[in-house]
Image (cartoon, grey):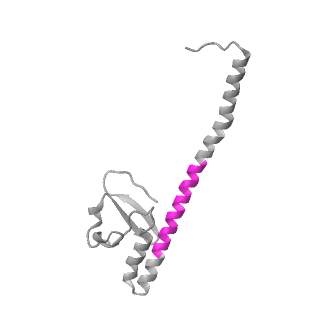
Amino acid sequence: MFFPIRTIKAKFIIVTTLFIILTVGVPFYFLLQQFKVNFQQRSETMLRTTLDVVYEGIMNAMMLCQQKNVQDIIDEVGKNRSITHIRIYDDKGIILYSTNRYEKGSNVIDYGSHHIHAVDEIFEYVELKKNKKCIL
């Protein structure tokens, strides 16, 4: 049960505590929200930069008719610990290049509910099953 505050000292402590919680807590909440937004923006920028590096490297290798370099580029970018898989496949879903060499020649649908569509420079992730759609 709530008990009445009788002394001035107790009232002062309660009011001071509430004041400190409000003056520190509210700005702290907005600061955390801003950190969250900044993290999201920087993550997207990092992803787009990585995709641009892969895209330009692959385009350069293909223009020079050096298909072996495509696998080397994927292997190099795949060494980044924040990248789990890179797969390049044709319109039928057959994996042509992958960070996991055992996946080459198999169908992308065999490796989970996600696959990647690439149209020019637009990269998006679309889940094949009943899961939500996530576009980056």
- Left or right: residue 44 compared with residue 130: right
Q: Nearer the viewer, residue 116 or 96?
A: 96
Does residue 45 show up magenta in the picture? yes
Q: Is residue 108 visible?
A: yes
Please report the bounds of the magenta region as a residue range. 34-55
Q: Where is residue 64 in the image (x, y as percent from the top left)?
A: 43, 87
Judge whether residue 92 can be spotted in this image.
no
Of residues 65 and 123, the one drawn nearer to the viewer in this rendering: 65
Q: Which residue is drawn at 39% across and 85% down?
A: 66
15 versus 72 height, above or below: above
Task: Work out whether residue 10 or residue 85 is closer to the camera in this orientation and state it.
Answer: 10
Write down the quadrant of residue 125 in the picture.
bottom left
121 left or right of 102? right
Q: Quadrant of the N terminus?
A: top right
Q: Which corner quadrant of the image does residue 115 belong to?
A: bottom left
Q: In the picture shown, does residue 35 fall above or below 101?
A: above
- The answer to which quarter of the image holds residue 5 is top right
For image coordinates 44% across by 65% down, the residue present is 123
Residue 47 percent coordinates (x, y): 49, 64
Name the residue furthest bottom: 64
Let me know if residue 16 is in the magenta part. no
Count of labels in the image:
0
Q: Residue at x 49, y 68 (%)?
A: 50
Our reading of the magenta stretch's main secondary structure is helix
Which x, y percent locates residue 32? 59, 45
Judged from this view, the residue extending furthest toward the front is: 9
The spot of residue 34 in percent (x, y) is 60, 49
